[in-house]
Image: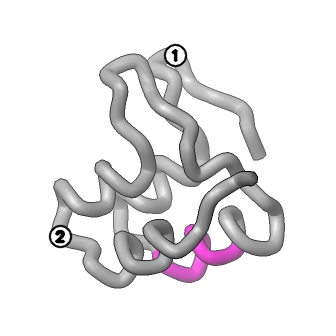
């Protein structure tokens, strides 16, 4: 779940960027993906979702954190 590509992006980041709500919920919830991970440009999954207008994902990620 925490594997990254050459730019530091995780599966959660790709799902958030592309608006895949069910995948985001599965990764962040069931699989406990790190919602606070940052890519090489300093952006999180929440930032990527917001930049692309995915309000449902922003709301979902804003309510989660890895304590």
Identify the residue at horizontal 35%, vertical 26% (top origin).
Answer: 42
Q: Closer to us: mark 2 or mark 1?
A: 2
State left or right for residue 66 relative to residue 10: right
Q: Position of residue 4 (x, y in %)?
A: 62, 28
Q: Which residue is mark 1?
A: 6
Q: Which mark is residue 59?
A: none
Assess whether residue 15 is covered by the magenta stretch.
no
Q: Nearer the viewer, residue 64 or 47?
A: 64
Residue 32, above or below 22 = above
Distance Cα–Cα, label 2 vs label 1: 25 Å
Label 1's element? loop
Label 2's element? loop
Q: Position of residue 65 (x, y in %)?
A: 62, 59
Q: Which residues are magenta?
A: 21-26
Q: How many marks?
A: 2
Colour approach in the figure: one colour
Q: Which residue is mark 2?
A: 53
Residue 5, above or below 60 = above
Residue 16, above or below 23 = above
Identify the residue at horizontal 30%, vertical 50% (top origin).
Answer: 47
Q: Position of residue 32 (x, y in %)?
A: 78, 59
State left or right for residue 10 relative to residue 56: right
Q: Earlier in the sequence, mark 2 or mark 1?
A: 1
Neighbour class for label 1 at 10 Å: few (<14), some, many (≥20)? few
Neighbour class for label 2 at 10 Å: few (<14), some, many (≥20)? some
Identify the residue at horizontal 31%, vertical 50% (top origin).
Answer: 48
When asked about the image quadrant of residue 26, the answer is bottom right
State left or right for residue 41 relative to residue 13: left
Q: Position of residue 1 (x, y in %)?
A: 77, 46
């Amino acid at each position: 779940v925490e594997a990254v590509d050459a730019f530091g992006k995780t599966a959660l980041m790709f799902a958030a960027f592309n608006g895949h709500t069910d995948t985001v919920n599965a990764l962040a919830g069931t699989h406990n993906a790190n919602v606070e991970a940052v890519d090489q440009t300093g952006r999180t999954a929440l930032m990527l979702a917001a930049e692309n207008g995915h309000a449902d994902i922003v709301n979902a990620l804003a309510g989660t954190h890895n304590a």
